[in-house]
Structures are given as structure tokens and as C-alpha cells.
Amino acid sequence: MPNTFSIDPESTGSSSSSDLARVCPVCAAEGPFPLAAAQNRFRLQECLHCGIVFLYPIPESGELNAYYTQDYYGEDRQKFHSVLERGILSLTRWKWNRLRPLFSPGDRMLDIGCGRGVLVQLARQADVEAYGLERHYPGAPNRPHVIYQDLADCDFPPAHFQGIVIWHVLEHLPDPVAALRRIHELLQPGGWVSVAVPNYGGAQAGASGPEWFHLDLPRHIWHLRPQVLERMLSRAGLRVMQRRTFSFEYDWFGTLQSWMNRWTGNNNRLYAMLKGEGGQSAGEKLSNLLLASALALPALASALWDAARGQGGTLTILAEKAGSEEGG
């Protein structure tokens, strides 16, 4: 295997490109690559050399932008009903409480893909100099300490941050390898990064196949098993410290919606209903709610059981930058 990862330009293109990648976009191994899954007109291929599962062809930026509309983000970045939004806010506070012991007052933090900047504000309330990066989109609001810019374009100096958070963002990026290298550059020696992605190696993904809620093609370009993400982090100069495979925010609902997709052809309609999207009759909404209510506790039990076996639906890794630049 090559000593460094790189995104090969031959692996990208538009939907009119060849149906099969010529080389792996991560490790540059030569194809052909077997089909891992398909959803609508989008296909996933798997490199048997390094284990990455990837969308191919990777749509060009103009085509991808069409999948990140105001409907995707929600009005003022609120996707759901206010009751659900309050629950999500409570979970964000809980996640911040897990991170807080890693900081000292005056430390600096970067939240990549920060949404409304809730984590940034919680960190600042705890005397952490926190900033957020968020994808620019039409109507993006101006929020304190949130920069609507890509990671590659931000002008923070090297070794600027003690901690970087990149939760459920890496799978969206055209070049996750370059992102991890940039994160390594921005971290101080001894600094850390917390990475969270849907766990393609988990039981939820394995059982659901193309009906997996978190497949989300084409927005999710990369689909990562634990060993693949750990290898990518290591080659970016980051040492894995902790691994978890459970997120209450993602795994319970991910299991529930995936079950509904598989058994009833629900096609994420429960999720669409919770976001307030139209197109469903009152009867369909009632049917979705009744089925979800019946499956809610079994889905929670399944998600917890998967996590207890290390097979949960979300992969979260804490990795550290080496204390010196040697070997980084």
C-alpha cells in the first residue's frame, strides 16, 4: 500500500463519467471494484485493498450543491419541530460535557460543520476560544464566531487549536484525506480531534443495505468502517486514543427509520414528516406515527445492543497529534 493517501483525480467526475472507477480514490489501488450498494441512480463501490466504500462517479460541485438546499438545512438551521429541536439542543449540551474536560480555560477549539454554532457558544461560555466552520449556502446567516468557508480556505495559522471537532462532516467532503491533513496542521502538538461518521461497518448498515437511513446518497460520498478511518487518521499523523460506536442522537432514529424503510418501503418518509416537508396525507402521517410508536422501544433496544457489541450505527474516534512533529 502506498505510504500516503491521496485523492486521485481520475476517480472524480460527473454523473456522465464511466460507471466504474479506474483507481481507488484513497489508496490508488487499481480496479475494477465490486458494487457495494446502489440507491436510485447512485452507486457505491468498495476497494478491497484499503476497505474504503465510495460513491462513483463523484458528482461535480455544481451537481452536489443542488442536494444542499434550504430544505436540507432547515429554516434558520432548524430542521425539526421546536420540541425535537430542544431535545437535540440537550444532546449537544451532553456532548459538550464530554468534551469539556479536554480543555483548559483559554484553549482554542474549531468545530468543522458547526450548524447553528451551538457547540461553539457552549465552549465560549466555558472560556474556550471557539470558532465554527460551516458550508456556505444561499441565505446563510451571520452568526458570532462562525465562518462560512471551506476548511481548505480558512486562514488559521498552523498549530493554532488544542481541539478540533468534525462530527458527521467527513463523509460529505470531496477530499477527506486532505481535510485530515489540514486538521493535523492546525492542531498543536498534543492536540486532539474528535471525528464522528456513520459506521458503515456496524450492524445497522449491514442489515439495512441500500435501505440504510444513513446511506444518504449522494451527500455521503465516503462510507467508513472503523479500521479504514483509523488507518486514515494514522497516516495523517494522528494517533487513535478512543473509539465509540454509539450516538443516542443518530442511532436510535437511524435504526427505526432503516427498519421502516426495509419492511414497508417507507423511503425516509418518517424523517421527512418530522422535518415538516409536505406531500403526505393525514392518513399517511398517522400511519407513520403509529408504526414508529410500535417500533420505537425495540429500535432503541437494538441500537443499544449493537453498541454493546461494538457494532453501533455511529463511529466516533478521538485521535491525538503526536507531541512532536517527528513522524507526523
Image: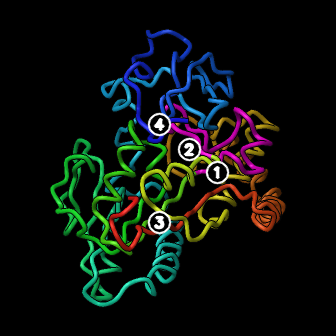
Disc number for residue 194: 3
Please tell me whether residue 202 belongs to the stretch shown in magenta.
yes
Depth check, mark 1 against mark 3: the one in front is 1
The residues tagged by marks 3 and 2 sit, at their Cα atoms, a distance apart of: 29 Å
Q: What residue type is labelled 2?
A: Ala
Q: In which quarter of the image is the C terminus?
A: bottom left
Q: Name the residue under label 2.
A: 272
Disc 3 + disc 2, Cβ < 8 Å: no
User: Of callouts 4 and 1, which one flags the residue occurring earlier in the amino acid sequence?
Assistant: 4
The residues tagged by marks 1 and 2 sit, at their Cα atoms, a distance apart of: 33 Å
Nearest the eye: 211 or 99? 99
The residues tagged by marks 4 and 1 sit, at their Cα atoms, a distance apart of: 22 Å
Q: Residue 130 appears in which quarter of the rendering?
A: bottom left
Highlighted magenta segment, given as a residue range: 198-224
Q: Name the residue under label 1.
A: 227
The structure residue drawn at horizontal position 62% and vertical position 16%, both measured from the top left corner, is 32
What secondary structure is found at the residue carrying circle 4?
Answer: loop
What secondary structure is found at the residue carrying circle 1?
Answer: helix
User: Of callouts 1 and 3, which one flags the residue occurring earlier in the amino acid sequence?
Assistant: 3
**Colour option used:** rainbow
